[in-house]
Image (spheres, coloured by chain):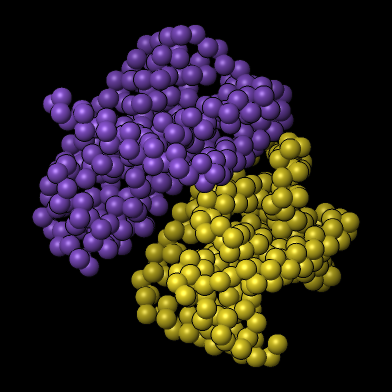
Chain colours: A yellow, B purple
Amino acid sequence: MRRSIVLAWQYLRLAVMNELQYRINFVIQIFLTAISLVTALVVLSLVYAQTDSLGGWSRYELQALLGIYTILSGVVRTSIQPNIERLMTDIQKGTFDYVLVKPIDAQVQISIRELRVWHCIDIVAGAAILLDALFRLEVSVTFGEVLLFGLTLTLGIVLIYTLWLLMACIAFWVIRVDNIFELFDNIASAGRLPVDIYPRWMRIILTYIVPMAFAVTVPAEVIIGRINLTNVGIQAAVTLGFFLVTRIVWNKAMVRYSGASA
Amino acid sequence: MRQFWEIYRKLILTSTLEMLQYRLGNLFWLLGMVFEPMIYLVMWSALATEKGGSIAGYTAGNLAAYYIAWTLVRQWNIALTPYGFEQRVREGGLTPLLLRPLHPFHYDLTSFIAMRFVGTLYWIPIGGALWWLFTPAFPGGWVTVGIFCVSLVLSFLMRFVLVYALGMVSFWTTRVSAIFNLYFAVETILSGRLVPQALLPEWAQQIANVLPFRWSFGFPIEVIIGKLTLPEMVLGLGIQLGWLALATVLFVVGWNAGIKRYSAVGA
């Protein structure tokens, strides 16, 4: 465990040093993040120009949800996606061998190798619109709620990580899986709205197959003061379940892997 | 000229057969594209319900029809992204293409036409399922359907050439993501992809009318769901043709100027 943390820290340091060489990318990334945020906020104002409440959510409640969605997708772009992409290339080219010969758990290694530092601007931007929404809602958040929010958000991140890894594991059996990721990404983008406004069949998909309901909606409910402890409990259970299943599938995949060129 | 068509026919045929190999992949890809409009549909339908049944003249049935037609038009809107072209310039992938007997544009166009055939084939069951799930209101009528088909083909051609022309920027700079993303963000809002044009504020509708985006996306949808009168439809087809012509000029000028600067990086 301690060795893994030291290693993660070293990878982080290297990634930062590497990306600091390309500072103009920082400016471009700010610009790109701004474009996508402005688009999202324009949609919000279009909707709420017509009404005060959408499926029981007010404008700034929905903005808070959008902030959380942006934070989570920032985490995906910064860390989860680049790591998984590297894993897929490794599997296709057979360079995954090098991971296996190193004396650290393979799953830990493949999860910490890559970091696209500039994408963390998305995380900052998401936090900013979340805070803005909370100020406008004038909710008084207690310390306990902040803790619970932190917990549910972390669980959401872990859940998304396990989903990505689970899909990547398919690559050990079938080599071409890019389309599955595309499908997943599209379904996951439904997380921008609270799950309860979708029709039943979409709710089922978003709860049981691609559980964005738990990753985004639950933390949002906590922070805007609609805490539903049952949902929090289910979120924790689902996350743990997916985590264990992923570990089992991962171990099976390790047995299955036979190299590409060798 | 006849020889030219013969080449086109053969190229389209080979690309079609090539694409039919990846059946499962294609299906996943199309299913993914269905999710995006469902988000918008749910959002605007919820809003229509809050407003007592309809919003800016769109009932829930109209909205369902809009976003089901959306999935087909989106399918026909796929073009070689300027990112793809930028990668060719940056990594030198353009070099071997220049050695082939026809202009690279023709190879790209034929493969994307083939993709439309395959995509439409896959779309049929998906469109049917959506129809069953959402009960849309389509007025029908042979004239409408005919004009829709023509506008669909024109929307594909005009967007394909326009986006291809945009890719020519890569000859001058390879830091293009900012330009392209801005283009696509404006397109998302003003084309009718995110929201039917009638739901935008008045001034935004005015801007959308003079930009190309609406004509390559929202227009065919509005045709098929019966929101336009016959003169409006004919005028729309004319505007599409105008944009196609303008895009072609932009592309030819951009290509001729740009190709002189191309230095075959990495080859």
Q: Position of residue A54 (x, y in %)?
A: 71, 39
> Total marks drawn?
0
What residue is shown at x 54% (from left), y 27% (from top)? B124
Front residue of B147/A208: it is: A208
Tell me if I can see residue B159 in this picture: no
Tell me if I can see residue A196 in this picture: yes
What residue is shown at x 76% (from left), y 43% (from top)? A204
Which residue occupies the extreme right position in the image?
A230
Q: Position of residue A79 (x, y in %)?
A: 56, 70
Residue B148 in the image: above or below residue B186:
above
Front residue of B140/A136: it is: B140
What residue is shown at x 44% (from left), y 64% (from top)? A29
Quadrant of image for the N terminus of chain A: bottom right
- Name the image quarter holding residue B135: top right
What residue is shown at x 64% (from left), y 72% (from top)? A254
Q: Position of residue A106 (x, y in %)?
A: 62, 79
Residue A208 in the image: above or below residue A9:
above
Front residue of B69/B223: it is: B69
Which residue occupies the extreme front position in the image?
A262
Q: Is residue B229 left or right of residue A75?
A: left
Q: Is residue B201 left or right of residue A140?
A: left
- Name the image quarter holding residue B245: top left
Q: Position of residue A241 (x, y in %)?
A: 80, 63
Q: Is residue B37 left or right of residue A245?
A: left
